[in-house]
Amino acid sequence: MMGAQASLYLVDDHVILREGLRAVLEAAGHRVLGETADITQALADLARLRPDVLLLDLNLGERNGLELLAELQRRALPVRAVVLTMSQQPRNVAEAIRLGAAGYVLKGSPAGELLRAIEAALQGRRHLCAEVADLALQAFTDTGSPATGFDALSPRERQIVALVVKGHSSTLIGNALHLSPKTVDTYRSRLMAKLGASDVPTLVRLAIKSGLIDLDDV
């Protein structure tokens, strides 16, 4: 049996998944206050609705859930975030934890795993499913590969790298992230210099080697 009931907000870019989550959560006695696939909308709703727990996917189309976690931390919003994602990249697990995520659960886990993560978040504890705990340990202890500049990138900078290596223009990236093309060009030049990448193919190789992106993403 679950403990305290929670008010929840869902951020995922798949409507069918959100509908399924809502059914599971409401059957467990929780209240879903809202849902969206858009980070900008989510920030406005979270500030207005003040749910207890945010359930957040990392892959949101052109944007990344880590960006939302960073904004929550910057704005000091009181919501506790539980990441619910397919991503098993150790770097994503470590970054989510660094940005204050109270839980990290893989999609495909039993519903009970997610409900335990929500309960832990309500109690001020952190919950990682077993596979994620191993990934986190790997991320924090892995010294087998040379350090790269990716470790120092902000969530927004990593997001722009991911879009650049997918071949998006500065105009398309700017439209997706609500930035001017000139600002994107500035980010791009700074990132290339910071990472020591002379061209986009080099940037792609570095991003894959670092685990920032998967081969399927390019």
Image (cartoon, rainbow, N blue to C red):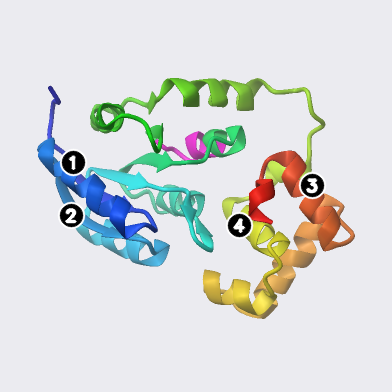
How far is disc 3 from disc 4 in space, using C-alphas? Answer: 14 Å
Q: Residues within 10 Å of mark 4 (few under 14, many from 20)?
A: many
CA–CA distance between discs 3 and 1?
40 Å
Identified at 41% across, 48% down, the residue is 57
Determine which residue is flagged by label 3. Answer: 206
Q: Quadrant of residue 128?
A: top left
- Label 1: which residue? 25
Give the mark nearest the N terminus, 1 or 2.
1
Nearer to me, 50 or 177: 177
Where residue 55 appears, x then y in whole percent?
32, 45
Front residue of 97 and 168 = 168
First-in-chain label (1 vs 4) = 1
Q: Is residue 77 left or right of residue 33?
A: right
Q: Amino acid at mark 3?
A: Leu
Q: Is residue 133 left or right of residue 157?
A: left
The kind of secondary structure element at disc 2 is strand
Q: Assign a secondary structure to mark 1.
A: helix
Looking at the image, is mark 3 or mark 1 earlier in the sequence?
1
Front residue (pair 190, 12): 12
Quarter holding the N terminus? top left
Q: From this viewpoint, is residue 180 visible?
A: yes
Task: Give the labeled residue for mark 4.
Answer: 159
**In front: mark 1 or mark 2?**
1
Give, as a single range, the part of the protein colored magenta.
95-101
Residue 194 appears anywhere in the view: no
Q: Position of residue 50 (x, y in %)?
A: 22, 52
